Amino acid sequence: MSSGRGTLIVGVDGSRGALAALRWAVAQARPMYADVVAVHVWQPSARYRAPYAPVDGLASPSDDRRRAHRILDDTVARVLAWEPGARLRPLLTEGPTVPVLVAHSDRAQLLVLGRRSSEDPALPALGAVARACIRRARCPVVTVPEAEADAPRPTAPALLVPHRTAAEGAPSRTLLNRRADDPCETATGAERPSRNRGHRRPF
């Protein structure tokens, strides 16, 4: 891909939210004259095994990598079926999810993440990975609800723009492009994530 074009980084984890995020990014990249990089971050499952747990049936790192490849390839293939000419590149990366995505955001125009749709007000609007990326990303962050995965045409979600103020050197957030009928939810800098730790959410 041409180095003169901008880049949209999309976090892909096999969820419907990630599929929606990738669809939106591909649609948005065309008028922006940008490329899309679908990033799937993985780690060997043995990393999460307790020292005393049995090793029988534990997947090998090569098995985990093959599974990660399938997740990424399947998501990319589904999006390319909608947009055959999309400038879309898959990228498989081993490591911790948030630091990897933040590192990729350093030279990106946007970091795009999916999120689950939930009618439970007790659950946070964004998962732990999305919240951490919003705090630490070096480019604007977009969150796309999973309902957009089946939309005829992806809508324009809100942008959450991290930047540092010259006076304080502290992160602040600016919400841009919010429409009255926008289905996306996101948190501004003044909002705090839910303290309900009984639920774990993906992107």
Image (tube, helix red, strand yellow):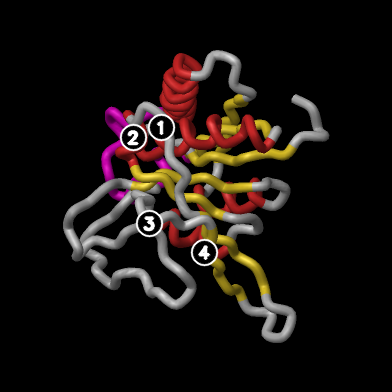
Q: Earlier in the sequence, mark 1 or mark 4?
A: 1
Q: Tell me the SS state at disc 2.
A: helix
Residue at the (24%, 68%) spot, across then down: 196
Mark identifier at residue 103: none
Q: Secondary structure of the magenta portion, mostly? A: loop
Residue at the (61%, 34%) spot, across then down: 29
Q: Quadrant of the N terminus?
A: top right
Badge 2 crowding class, 10 Å Cα cut-off, few under 14, some 14 to 19, many 20 or more, is: many
Q: Nearer the viewer, mark 2 or mark 3?
A: 3
Alpha-carbon span between mark 4 and mark 3? 13 Å
For the residues bearing labels 1 and 4, Cβ distance under 8 angstroms = no
Q: Which residues are magenta?
A: 43-60
Residue identifier under label 2:
16
- In the image, taking residue 87 as reference, residue 55 lies left or right, namely left
Q: Amino acid at mark 4?
A: Leu
Q: Amino acid at mark 3?
A: Ala
Alpha-carbon span between mark 2 and mark 3? 24 Å
Q: Amino acid at mark 1?
A: Leu
Residue at the (51%, 39%) spot, across then down: 41
Residue identifier under label 3:
180
In percent of width and height, residue 119 lies at: 18, 54
Residue identifier under label 4:
175
Q: Nearer the viewer, mark 1 or mark 4?
A: 4
Q: Earlier in the sequence, mark 4 or mark 3?
A: 4
